[in-house]
Image (cartoon, rainbow, N blue to C red):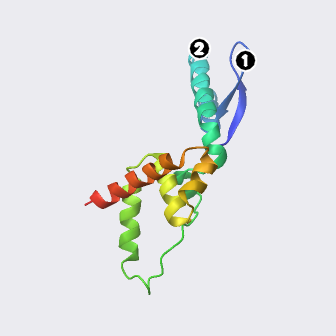
């Protein structure tokens, strides 16, 4: 997760995402007046979100981030599995309805071959928690029409 340091109107240092920084810059360039109290509240919320998410993102890249960067997940060979595109399309459609953690754990387990134990160790979580999360995504896949 990328962020930058910024300051509240009282001088307190906070972390804000690049998205918020760029939006504040656009408002400033377009000479749209935003009260300092409102800007401070946006920055405080961003700072809280970054701090809550930091330990998660330290060990993981989000599914959307990987997709946006053009990272390819291991593909299935068409000559061996002629329905591969349909299967992958179905998987990605279901993953779009899963939580971010379910997506990441599903991908780590099934696409990258990581064990539940390895995922749990990486995320500092219980193995059973990781397994249950993956199983929920699998159940959604089974129930998908």
According to the picture, the residue beneath numbered tag 1 turns out to be 12
- Front residue of 86 and 102: 102
Q: Closer to the camera: disc 2 or disc 1?
A: 1
- Front residue of 19 and 56: 56
Q: Residue at x 27, y 57 (%)?
A: 143
Above/below status of 16 relative to 83: above
The spot of residue 130 in percent (x, y) is 50, 49
Q: Quadrant of the N terminus?
A: top right
- Front residue of 19 and 46: 46
| Residue 137 appears in the figure | yes
Report the Cα–Cα distance between label 2 and label 1: 13 Å
Query: Which residue sits furthest left?
Result: 145
Q: Residue at x 71, y 27 (%)?
A: 6
Q: Secondary structure at mark 1?
A: loop
Above/below status of 73 relative to 27: below
The spot of residue 39 in percent (x, y) is 59, 21
Question: Toward which corner of the image does residue 55 lie, by quadrant?
Answer: top right
- Front residue of 39 and 29: 39
Q: Residue at x 52, y 52 (%)?
A: 64
According to the picture, the residue beneath numbered tag 2 turns out to be 37
Q: Secondary structure at mark 2?
A: helix
Asked whether, in this view, residue 141 is left or right of residue 65, the answer is left
Question: Toward which corner of the image does residue 88 lie, by quadrant?
Answer: bottom left
Q: Work out whether mark 2 precedes mark 1 in sequence or the reverse, and give the earlier one.
A: 1
Residue count near mark 1 (Cα–Cα under 10 Å), binned few <14, some 14–19, many ≥20? few
């Amino acid at each position: 997760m990328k962020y930058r340091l910024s300051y509240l109107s009282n001088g307190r240092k906070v972390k804000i995402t690049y998205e918020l920084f760029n939006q504040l810059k656009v408002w400033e360039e377009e000479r749209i007046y935003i009260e300092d109290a409102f800007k401070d509240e946006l920055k405080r919320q961003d700072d809280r979100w970054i701090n809550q998410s930091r330990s998660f993102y330290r060990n993981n890249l989000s599914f959307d981030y990987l997709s946006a960067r053009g990272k390819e997940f291991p593909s299935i060979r068409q000559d061996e599995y002629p329905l591969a595109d349909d299967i992958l399309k179905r998987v990605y459609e279901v993953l779009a309805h899963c939580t971010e953690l379910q997506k990441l754990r599903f991908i780590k387990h099934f696409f990258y071959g990581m064990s539940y134990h390895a995922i749990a160790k990486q995320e500092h979580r219980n193995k059973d928690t990781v397994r249950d999360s993956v199983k929920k995504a699998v159940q959604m896949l089974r129930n998908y029409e």
